[in-house]
Image (cartoon, rainbow, N blue to C red):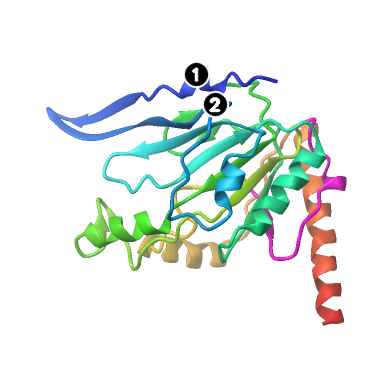
Amino acid sequence: MQMLIHCVTAVAFVFFVSLGSRLDAAAGTSSVATIGSPAYVSPSWPDGVGQLVNDSTRTDGWNDWFSEWPNDVNHYCYQITGMADLNRLVRGLASTKGELRQIRLAPLKEPRGLGWVTSLPKGNDTPVVFSIGDQKRLDEWFGRLRNGKFGVMQFEATPVAVPPTLTIFVQNEAIDLGQLEIPDGIAVTAGYCPRPFHKWNTIREKERKKQRANEPEANAKPVDDATQDAVDQINEFLERLAQRVKQNEKKQ
């Protein structure tokens, strides 16, 4: 199936936020990959990431940017024909050399928002997104900050870049969690495509963690039946995976 997403978002667009007559910020989307063409592979990425970025099922890719931000995260979409393709991508993820490789299971049919301003059209039918950050770029960006400050944000240390991440959209017809194979060494959680950083290392982030630890759990918002079914599937899958990990630890 040919993707329609690049027709909508691959052309970079810009918006400006002004205060009086002063230009404060700009943001937009840049195309980093198009269907049928090889994509650039950063030498800063972990070894093996290039094979994922240029897999035959990869269609389009985007870099969502904000002025003066490190803008190191790229997102790539894939149109797989079934679980054989997906399990090949997962094996490719496992073969990358980063310290952390992760899979996120989203209880949705397809992605919509990516980053600051990138929005994919409804009905894009994308079952898998690969996301990757660049720690070298973050190190260089943080080194230019004065006293770790960016606007109202106060960083205590360099943010941690988004590791190689596959986000799988469980409601998509191409996905069957019962056939998903997870190699050892892959972290699997419920969630959506990664935010700008894997770990922000801001004072506010630390304060929010303490606050959440002391807050009672909020009541979950009601969802439609299909989404609830996907949530249940994800929870059951994660439980089975946790049991497998415990069994493997006992054997060792």
**Magenta segment:** 173-191
Residue 199 seen in render: yes
Compute the Cα span from label 2 to label 1.
8 Å
Residue pictured at 22% horizontal, 58% vertical: 144
Look at the picture and state if 29 lies above or below 147. above
Apparent side of residue 222 relative to residue 215 in the rendered image (left or right): right
Label 2 crowd (10 A; few <14 / some 14-19 / many >=20): some
Residue receiving disc 2:
120
- Sequence-wise, the earlier of marks 2 and 1 is 1
Circles 2 and 1: CB atoms closer than 8 Å: yes
Where does residue 63 sit, x and y in percent of width and height?
Answer: 43, 37
Question: What kind of residue is marked 2?
Answer: Leu
Apparent side of residue 223 relative to residue 53 in the rendered image (left or right): right
Residue 154 seen in render: no
Residue receiving disc 1:
8
Q: Secondary structure at mark 1?
A: helix
Residue pictured at 57% horizontal, 30% vertical: 112
Apparent side of residue 88 relative to residue 162 in the rendered image (left or right): right
Look at the picture and state if 72 lies above or below 39. below
